[in-house]
Image (spheres, helix red, strand yellow):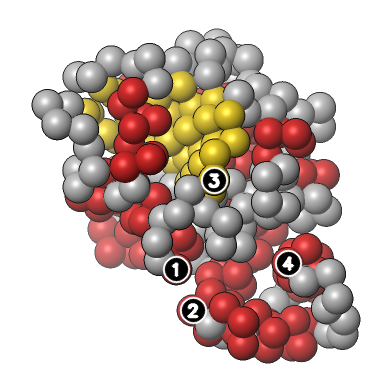
Amino acid sequence: MLRVLGVHGVGAHRYHRRTSSPERAATALATDWFRHLGTAMPANSSVDLQMAYYAHLLHPGGGPPVEEDPAMLEPAEQGLFVDWMRLLNPALTGNVPRAGDWLARTHGSATRLFALTFCRELNAYLSDHDAREAVRRTVADAIARFEPDVVVAHSLGSVVAYESLCAHQDHDIGLLVTLGSPLAMPGVVADHLEPGDHGRPPGVRRWINLADPDDIAAVPHGEAARRSGPDEDIRIRAGMWEFQTPGAYLRSTEVTDVIFGAGTLT
């Protein structure tokens, strides 16, 4: 049986609010991930899927606010938001509300809400040293306890997994799979990574990054391999806007073929 450890992205606080326990939140999240993964899993495959759950450590009060107004972001969050929007549209000028209006017009209001949530959670991770250490330790402890064959990290989770695997090098991971990763995003993510010298984390034998070209978090497109160090950087079409959640990626046969077919156990 293939042991897969998932590392979630943004927006996972709702699992903790619903269950009132990080352990139960991890179980509920794993159930949702398995529901998606099972639709595209190769025939006759079996998997033990568990989650490294860390959302409660970034916002102990129950999660970031859900206001849809970019002006409600804190100054550091606004800086991340504007720098990110200018990567998507280099011609973009003006203030935070104008950048938010452009995102909503071109990608929809749901995508803008995702971007605001992403900036809040990313800033919480980058700006709070103790929370950052606790999140990385949570992932490292989950790896040590579960001893997965494959680590699958989505969105912000790819940043968390990358830094955790670099900070805690006593692991042997056959395959790291990153989905919709912002690791290569200059100014917003890449320049803040610890360690600063990018490359495959020690203890990871193979790293494959997959992203939909329409995924606004995975920018600049095609840069992950050059800036971050995966062995392969694969463009796929998840087929819907749902890249902001892991569902579309996990239901992709291109993703499941990598998880179950890249020299791992089935």
Amino acid carrying label 4: it is Leu
- Which image quadrant is residue 129 in? top right
Amino acid carrying label 2: it is Ala
Q: Would you name the residue on which mark 2 appears?
A: 110
* Residues marked 1 and 2 touching at CB (< 8 Å): yes
Residue shown at the point (69%, 28%) measured from the top left: 229
* Residues marked 1 and 4 touching at CB (< 8 Å): no
Q: Residues within 10 Å of mark 1 (few under 14, many from 20)?
A: some
Helix, strand or loop under label 3: strand
- Which image quadrant is residue 239 in? bottom left
Question: Foreground mark, 4 or 2?
Answer: 4
Q: CA distance from mark 1 to mark 4?
A: 16 Å
Q: Would you name the residue on which mark 4 appears?
A: 88
For residue 207, above or below residue 205: below
Q: Would you name the residue on which mark 1 appears?
A: 241
Q: CA distance from mark 3 to mark 4?
A: 17 Å
Return the residue nearer the eye: 262 or 112: 262
Residue 125 seen in the current view: no
Amino acid carrying label 3: it is Arg
Residue shown at the point (24%, 43%) measured from the top left: 40
Q: CA distance from mark 1 to mark 2?
A: 9 Å
